[in-house]
Amino acid sequence: MDSTENLGLIAAHLGLDLLAVTLLTFGVFHPRHRRRELVPAYLALNVALFAVVAALGSVGNDGGLALGFGLFGVLSIVRLRSDAVQHQEVAYYFTTLVLGLLCGLPGLGLGVAAGLAGILLLVMYVADHPRLYARERRAVVTLDVVHRDTGALRADLARRLGEPLRWTVREVDYVRDLMVVDVRYREPEPQARPGRPGSDGAADIAWEPAAAGNGARVAVTATAVNGPAR
């Protein structure tokens, strides 16, 4: 009877975990980021961690020590490289991980686990909402001119992208007369966006700023402000 009740409790927690991670991946993450290759990674990490925690937690008195060593081993093999994974996607990684931990603990009541999982889902839904800072972008821009003062650089970036919020000069090449700038900017309103027919500097823009959303790296070849094409 105890074994049957234990299996029923694990099944209930598993159902809650699957519901929560499904809502997170298919209801929040994929519709917003369209990274299909990360969906199986999130699901596998969540379910595998749930299985490990549920199995170690049902051992008994020795389960706490085994659980600690098991979690240490699981987390030590999870390596996230910032070059391949954006910060938003790292947040989803840790959320799926925590959901597996919460739902896999047999000593945690089903209602408490459901409440905590709901809080996590709500936080991710709000924090990663598309309308939150909707016009803020990031791009790595290559200019074929070297600006020697910040005012000229700000004016150039504002004319080509939008209002610069913060930038970092990554490279200055006086031989080829170019500079590489990592810039965070606020995209202009649609009716005021540069690069449309009849607007100044339309021929100088080699890309659409909206294509650099959410931290995409986009190379741009630009000319000097009010200068002739090279």
Image (spheres, grey):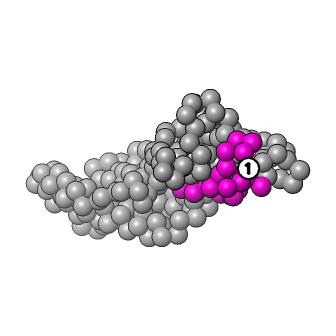
Residue 206 visible from this viewpoint: yes
Identify the magenta region. Answer: 203-230
Magenta segment, prevailing SS (helix, strand or loop)? loop
Give x and y (percent) for residue 116.
43, 44
The quadrant holding residue 7 is bottom left
- The residue that mark 1 highlights is 228
The N terminus lies in which quarter of the figure?
A: bottom left
To which quarter of the image does residue 18 belong? bottom left
Q: Residue at x 47, y 60 (%)?
A: 21
Q: Tell me what residue is drawn at x 75 percent, y 42 percent.
A: 226
Count of labels in the image: 1
User: On the rendered image, what quadrant is the C terminus found in?
Assistant: bottom right
Query: Which residue extends farthest right?
Result: 198
Residue 208: say if magenta: yes
Q: Residues within 10 Å of mark 1 (few under 14, many from 20)?
A: few
Question: Height in image: 3 above or below 180?
Answer: below
Q: What residue is drawn where x is 89% and y is 50%? A: 198
Left or right, 122 with reference to 44: right
- Secondary element at image label 1: loop
Identify residue type, mark 1: Pro
| Residue 17 in view of the camera | no
Horizontal side of residue 203 vs 50, given as left or right: right
Looking at the image, is 117 positioned above or below residue 23? above
* Residue 141: image location, x then y, percent: 57, 50
Q: Nearer the viewer, residue 49 or 178?
A: 178
- Seen from the viewer's position, the closer of residues 156 and 55 is 156
Which percent across, then down, holds residue 48?
Answer: 32, 66
Q: Is residue 76 left or right of residue 16?
A: left
